[in-house]
Image: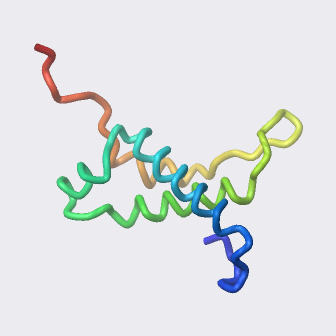
């Protein structure tokens, strides 16, 4: 996704961090766990794998903070990929 040659391993640690951050961000936004996705869909849907790749790539390409001088917006397509899997409210009744 980031178009890095396989022999270039200098940034493997940061890419691993960005991948983990992307996964955690998506799971938190969806109010989900990996286990709940597997329970509902049999596996983590491909859409969410793509969303994770897009977000990790965005983090890799835009490493600095966003300011009014340098604006870098997360791709809008990301919303299309993860929002159908979001749980908007808890189904659990409070006792």
Q: Percent x, y for residue 79? A: 49, 47
Instruction: State the image coordinates of residue 29 (x, y, percent, origin top left).
Output: 44, 39
Query: Which image quarter is the C terminus in?
Result: top left
In this view, 56 is above or below 12:
above
**Nearer to the camera, 30 or 33:** 33
Q: Residue furthest right?
A: 69
Q: Left or right: where does residue 33 sit relative to residue 9? A: left
Q: Identify the residue at horizontal 74%, vertical 72% (top origin).
A: 10
Q: Residue at x 28, y 28 (%)?
A: 89
Q: What residue is at 33 percent from the left and 62 percent from the top?
A: 45
Give coordinates of residue 69: x percent, y percent: 89, 37
> Which residue of the protein is positioned furthest toward the bottom in this rendering?
7
Q: Which residue reaches farthest left?
A: 95
- Left or right? Give the position of 38 relative to 19: left
Please identify the quarter of the rendering in which residue 65 is found. Answer: top right
Q: Residue at x 64, y 48 (%)?
A: 74
Residue 56 or residue 46, whichever sits in front: 56
């Amino acid at each position: 996704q980031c178009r890095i040659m396989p022999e270039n391993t200098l940034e493997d640690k940061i890419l691993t961090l960005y991948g983990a951050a992307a996964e955690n961000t998506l799971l938190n936004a969806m109010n989900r766990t990996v286990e709940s996705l597997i329970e509902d869909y049999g596996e983590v849907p491909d859409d969410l794998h793509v969303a994770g790749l897009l977000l990790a790539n965005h983090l890799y390409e835009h490493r600095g903070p966003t300011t009014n001088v340098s604006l870098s917006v997360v791709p809008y397509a990301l919303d299309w990929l993860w929002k159908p899997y979001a749980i908007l409210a808890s189904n659990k009744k409070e006792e």
